[in-house]
Image (spheres, rainbow, N blue to C red):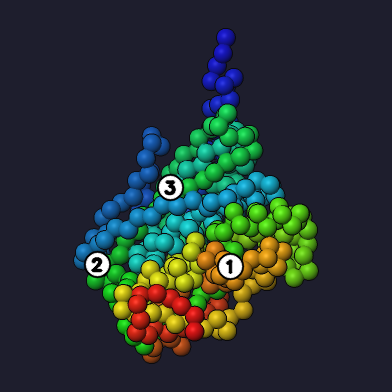
Amino acid sequence: MTSYQAAGVDIEAGERAVALMKDKVARSRRPEVVDDASGFAGLFDASALLRYRRPLLASATDGVGTKVMIAQQYGKHDTIGIDLVAMVLDDLVVCGAEPLFMTDYIACGKVVPERVAEIVGGVAEGCRLAGAALVGGETAEHPGAMGPDEYDLAGAGTGVVEADELLGPARVVAGDVVLGLASSGLHSNGYSLVRHVVREAALSLDTVLPELGRPLGEELLEPTRVYSLDCLELARAVDVHAYAHITGGGIEGNLSRSLPGHLDALLDRSSWTPPAVFGTLAGYGGIAQADMDRTFNLGVGMAAVVSQESADEAIRVLEARGLAAWVLGEIVPGEGRARYR
């Protein structure tokens, strides 16, 4: 006689995973979260939106790409959830939206409760860093479709912004200043190229490279900086016109999305030094500068476009929050693209 467990699905393991993650999820709770005894849905008290005159809901969904394969290979699962939150909720804050809540989805070949709890614990920590609540999620076991040690994760988030405080291209004017906000490293983009370089150069994730000062696996799994609260605080303090989350497509590709069609962002490559990991990858992989530019953030995780008179104060605000920032460029007449001098 056969059974669901014999087919590879362990319901009891899933229940143990839920029990293990409960305390971690609770740390991301916001006062607007309402308990649902059934557990089928996450509830959020929408009366919190009454303080807005015209609230616009913002939503985003994303994953962390093949960075999960590095986590699986290296056996470190407690920070990949932070990467997920950053990829989702930092997209929301680009338009000025405050992240409210998030849900996650984990697909795996086999539910290992402790590993799932580590992953979800990272998601909960990321939500805490973003000021959002993790209100629910799903863990699905896919035996036969995925190996027992394989998993993938994705998430969706919701935020809110006052309609007349919406940030974006319409606010950007000539003479504005572009600020670079430092990344924590590779973040969560370009890992297909990263894995190709590691494989072709026969590098071990356990190798301590002199320029990195720690095992390569630790460097590649450095969690993505969560910028949500930094960006919200900056928008309250100074005249911010737009943000750009620097993800796949690099600085030029993403910053161009935050420009009107008649203006360019003229960037100064000499204004910052990319973290060592980017030079390491370029060197071992023989990667051309153009490909580095298109693939990686190169040390700029978020860009802010602010009024000229706000630039100095903006840098002070960010540095007071422990985030390095600098003048990356300026807004000039053009064709709606970011480019280097």
* Residue type beneath disc 1: Met
Above or below 129: residue 308: below
> Which residue is labeled 2 in the image?
163
Report the disc number at residue 292: 1
Are there few (<14), some (14-19), or many (20+) residues within 10 Å of tag 3? many
Return the x and y of residue 276 as percentages of the image width and height.
68, 71
The mark nearer the N terminus, 3 or 1, is: 3
Single out the residue that lies furthest toward the bottom.
309
Is residue 235 visible in the rendered structure shown here? no
- Nearer to me, 146 or 235: 146
Identify the residue at image location x=39%, y=83%: 331
Marks 3 and 1: which is nearer the front? 1
Asked which secondary structure carries label 2, the reply is helix
Return the x and y of residue 47 as percentages of the image width and height.
26, 55
Are there few (<14), some (14-19), or many (20+) residues within 10 Å of tag 1? some
Is residue 206 visible in the rendered structure shown here? yes
Return the x and y of residue 174 as percentages of the image width and height.
34, 85
> Which residue is labeled 3 in the image?
103
Report the disc number at residue 49: none
Asked which secondary structure carries label 1, the reply is helix
Relative side of 101 to 196, left or right: left
